[in-house]
Image (cartoon, grey):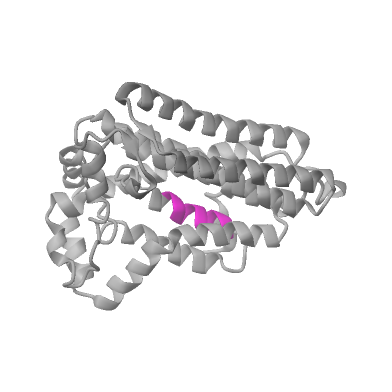
Amino acid sequence: MTSAALSSPLPNVGASSRYGLGRGARLRLIGLLLASLSLGAGTLLVILAATGMRFAPEFANFLLLAVFVFLLAGFCRFRRHDWRMADSANIVAFVTVSLLLCGLVANMGLRMRFPIMDPLLARGDVLIGFDARAVAGFVASQPLFSRLLHIAYNVSGPLCAVAVLWNLMKQDRVRLWQVVATLIVAMQLTALVSIFFPARGAAVTLGLDVLQGRGLPFGAGTYAVSAFEHFYRGGELLVKLEDMNGIVCFPSFHTVMALAILQGFVASPFRWVALGWSALTIVSTVPIGGHYVIDLAGGILVWLVACGLATWACREFGSPGDRGRV
């Protein structure tokens, strides 16, 4: 398989992706990011109004951090520093707000108490002939493979950050913002969809927790059960930072991150390494993350939508003379 074949399903920005973003692309990008965050904020307001919940003042620290970093980005641009300084600050600010909204919506959204979807998701696996028990059992019987999948599952977030830093270092501004925008849009879409598909996961539903310590790491597929029960069954109205956890089953956001990693490195010398590692991450979501295979399909769909929107927003390239300009 050639590198061109590998790149074909991903944004094909070509050599011109190193040029600065044109004015039209910048406006579309800003609009897309603000629309995504507005979706998350609007959903959160609906949850607050419907449930009477509120969150602790400690969450305001994240908003203050984002505001400070946005101001820092404006200062860097005003002083005409290297565009990477302003872009780095803007990325940190946008991602901070996006993570905050995603976490609050996904966790607090459980209090809406839509029907538990584990039976439906498990039935989907049966219909396509996928046996999560067999997969988890096989991985548990291969300790080295199990350990490798555990690592792949846990480092997917940091590797997304590495993919962003790589394109920042290579001054590939278009691909940089494609990856960032993909992740931000996907966060908000994932959190929104998860409200209507609350699920504890395959590890709990199928009793795969018995494999923990017997080939699978402790917490595999069950690490968020207490947080799930706290929000879904509980009645406490004040949400604290310590209550938060990654409780989303459908769609799988780890699948989104795996594809975003590949998206960030697809034009680099590390494309094959990224492909292999992304595949490991997706495989890990079943035995380590406790997902149904249908969750992976949902994650792929979310990534396709988010990536398509991000590619559309960044598709206008500047001229060579615009290189590095903000």
Does residue 133 belong to the magenta stretch?
Answer: no
Outermost residue on the bottom side: it is: 144
Q: Quadrant of the C terminus?
A: top right
Q: Residue at x 24, y 56 (%)?
A: 221
View extreme (front): residue: 57
Q: Position of residue 285 (x, y in %)?
A: 31, 57
Q: Which is more toward the observer, 305 or 221?
A: 221
Residue in the image at 25% along x and 44% along y: 228
Residue 263 belongs to the span the image colors magenta = yes
Q: Is residue 74 above or below residue 277?
A: above
Residue 190 is situated, as x and y percent measured from the top left of the image, at 40, 39
Q: Position of residue 37 (x, y in %)?
A: 53, 33
Query: With 36 as the anchor, is 291 left or right in this view?
Result: left
Q: Quadrant of residue 170?
A: bottom right
83 horizontally vs 162: left or right: right
Q: Magenta residues?
A: 256-265
Q: Nearer the viewer, residue 106 or 129?
A: 106
Q: Is residue 295 visible?
A: yes
Q: Which one is nearer the viewer's eye here, 303 or 177?
A: 177
- The residue located at (27%, 51%) in the rendering is 224
Looking at the image, how many numbered discs can be counted on the residues? 0
Q: What secondary structure is the magenta-colored segment mainly?
A: helix
Percent of width and height locating residue 216: 22, 68
Residue 187 in view, yes or no: no
Q: Which residue corresponds to the image point at 33% horizontal and 67% vertical from the top-left? A: 150
Q: Is 147 placed above or below 274 here?
A: below
